[in-house]
Image (spheres, grey):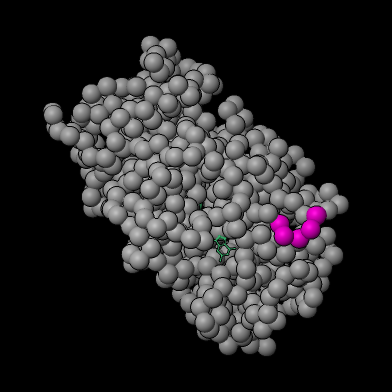
Amino acid sequence: MGFDQSQVKHERLLAWVGEVASMCKPDAIYWCDGTTDEYNRLMQQMVNCGMAIPVEGRPNSFYFRSDPSDVARVEDRTFISTPQQIETGPTNNWMDPAELKPLMRGLYDGCMRGRTMYVIPFSMGPIGSPISKIGIEITDSPYVVVNMHIMTRVGTRVMDVLGKDGEFIPCLHSVGAPLAPGQKDALWPCAPIERKFICHFPDENLIWSYGSGYGGNALLGKKCLALRIASVIARREGWMAEHMLILRLISPAGRRYHIAAAFPSACGKTNLAMMQPTIPGWRCECIGDDIAWMKIGPDGRLYAINPESGFFGVLPGTSYESNPMAMETLKANCIFTNCALDDRGEVWWEGMTEDPPSHAIDWKGKDWTPSCDTPAAHPNARFTAPARQCPVICPDWENPDGVPIDIFVFGGRRAKLVPLVCEAFDWDHGVFLGATASSETTAANIGAVGNVRRDPMAMKPFCGYNMGDYFSHWLSMGDRLGNNAPKIFYTNWFRKGEDGRWLWPGFGENSRVLKWMCERVDRMAAARETPIGRLPADGALDLRGLDIASEDLKELLRVDKEAWIRELDSIREHFAQFGDRLPQRLWVQLQKLEQRLKE
Ligand code: GTP
Ligand code: SPV
Ligand code: MN
C-alpha cells in the first residue's frame, strides 16, 4: 500500500520528511504512489466518514462541502518571506523569515496529531521533461491528495526521476486541526482565518502552508509552486511563469495561432481556453487554463507549456451554453467542491441549467429552494477535472517542447471605461498595458467582491518578488525576443451598459476578437489608432451572424478621452509605489499616453 519508504534513497528528502514528522507528530506516514488504486482507497475512506459523497450520474465523481470559512484563497494571509522587505515589494505581504519561521514552527508543532501524514511526490510539467519541476507536498489532508492526483503528475515515476539527489521543492501543508485522542474529526477540518498562513521562502524554494484545505491555499503545486516560487526561479534563469491560459486557434486554412492570455482569477481563462468559436471554420484547442511556463526556444521564439495536468475551475456560470467543453470534461472522474446537490444526488450550481432544481441541499448543507435569497452554490465553487478528458485538449498539450506563442492577451473585468479589445503599439506599450491592468475583485479570494484594483499581468496575488523587478523582467524578455516577441493585446469581455447588462455576448463569440488579433499578426485586418492603443477599424471585427445592437458595439469600442485622462493619476500612484524599482521605460510609456490623450 503506497510507496515503501525503505525504497527511498534520497537522503535530503528522507531527512526533510523525518524533520517534518517529528515536528508535526502525525499518527502515521504514508508515501503516495499515484495509482488509481490509491485514489480509490482514499476516496472510499472519505466517503465512509461522510466527507465525500458520490455524485449521481457521473461515474467516479465525488462531492465535497468545505467549512463555510474556508472557501477561497486568502491573499491577506499569504506571505513572501525574504530577509529584505524590498525584495517582496509593495504588492506582497512580507514577514522576516527570522520571525515567521519560529511562528510557523509553533503552529506546526503537533499539528498532525491523530492524522496520517501523506508524502506526495509530484511533477509540474511532463515527468522527466527538462522544463518540469519536481515538488514534494507533505499534507495531512486526503482531499488534497486526491486533488493533487488530478492537478499534477503524482507517483513513483517522479521518485525515479528524483533518484538519489535530484532537486525538489519542499511544500509543507497542514489543515491545522490536530485531533485529541477520541476526538471526532470535522467533515472539513481547518483553522480559523487568523491562524491561516500561506508562506513562501523564495531564497530557499520553500513553501509552508497552514490552516486551509481549499484550492490554491492547499494544492501547493499550483499558485504557490508554479507561480510564486516559479516566478522567482524564472526571473533568475531568464524564463517566464505566468497566470495565463494557453490555446491553439486554427483558421479555416489550417494556420495555427498560439495565444496565451492573463486574466485575473475568475475573469474568464478557463472559458476562453476551451472556447467553441462561433465563426464558421475556426477551431480552438486547449493547452492549459491557468498557468504558463515559457522559455525562449532554439529558434528564438517563446515556447509555452502548461505545468498542470488538471483544471481547478469555477462552477457557477458553467453550462452547455457558456462552456460546453468544460461540461463534457465534467462527465466522470471529477471532484466537485461547494456546489449544491439536488434531490437525485446530482450536482447543481447557478447558471448550470436555465431552470434551477425545485429543491436542493446547498453548499452549506442546508435546504435550498429557488426562493432562497442566497445562492445554492458558493460563488467560488470549483471542479477538479483531468485535462485529458477535455474533448478539445490539444494533441500537443503534453509536448515537453511547448507551443510557440504568437499572441499575449491581458485583460480584466471592468464594467466601464475599458474597451472590448485594444492592440499595443509595441512591446513596451504592451508591458505598460499589462502593468496597469485593472479588474474588479472576485470570489476567488476571501474579501470584498467588485472593487476595482490594479492587478498587473493578473499576477498581483502570484508574483513571488518585487513587482517592479517583474516589470523589468518582462521588458528584458522583450529585448531578448526582438522581432520574435508575441504581439500584445488587451481585452475586456465585461463592459456593461447603463442598464447593467453585458454589452458583449462573450464565451464562443470571443473568437471574433481573437480572429481579429490573428489577422493583425498576419497584417490582414485594419485598425484605428486611439490614444490608448489600436482598436478594430470600422468593419474589421468579423460580426457576421452575430446579433448585436450597433449602439452596444459603439460603446464597446468607445475610448472616452476625458475618463482616461482621469485614470492617469491612479496609474501614477500605482507606479510610484515601486519607487526606483519601477523601470524608467514604464514612466516613459505613461508620459506618452498622457501626451496622446492631451493632443
Ligand atoms: P481562475 O480559475 O480563478 O483563475 O478563473 P478563470 O480566469 O479561469 O475564470 P473562468 O473562465 O472560470 O470564469 C469565471 C466566471 O466568469 C465564470 O462564471 C464564467 O461564466 C464567467 N465568464 C467567463 N468568460 C466570460 C465572458 O466572456 N463573458 C461573461 N459575461 N462572463 C464570462
Ligand atoms: C485562482 O484563484 O486564480 C485560481 C483558483 O485559479 S485557486 O487554485 O484556488 O487559486
Ligand atoms: Mn487562476
Q: Is residue 280 magenta?
A: yes
Q: Is residue 270 magenta?
A: no
Name the residue located 66 percent from the left edge and 39 percent from the top edge.
397
Q: Position of residue 511 (x, y in %)?
A: 70, 60
- The span shown in magenta is 277-281
| Quadrant housing the C terminus | bottom right
Q: Looking at the image, can residue 172 be seen?
A: no
| Quadrant housing the N terminus | top left
Q: Looking at the image, can residue 369 be seen?
A: yes
> Position of 346 compared to 435: left or right?
left
Occupied quadrant, residue 199: top left
> Position of 176 compared to 59: left or right?
left
Name the residue located 69 percent from the left edge and 41 percent from the top edge.
394
> Position of 147 compared to 93: left or right?
right
Q: Position of residue 594 (x, y in %)?
A: 61, 81
Name the residue located 52 percent from the left edge and 61 percent from the top edge.
354
Q: Position of residue 186 (x, y in %)?
A: 23, 40
Vertical placement of residue 439 versus 106, above or below? below
Q: Main secondary structure of the magenta part?
A: loop
Q: Residue furthest top?
A: 6
Q: Nearer the viewer, residue 174 or 342?
A: 342
Q: Nearer the viewer, residue 275 or 436?
A: 275
Q: Nearer the viewer, residue 232 or 292?
A: 292
> Position of 86 compared to 212: left or right?
right
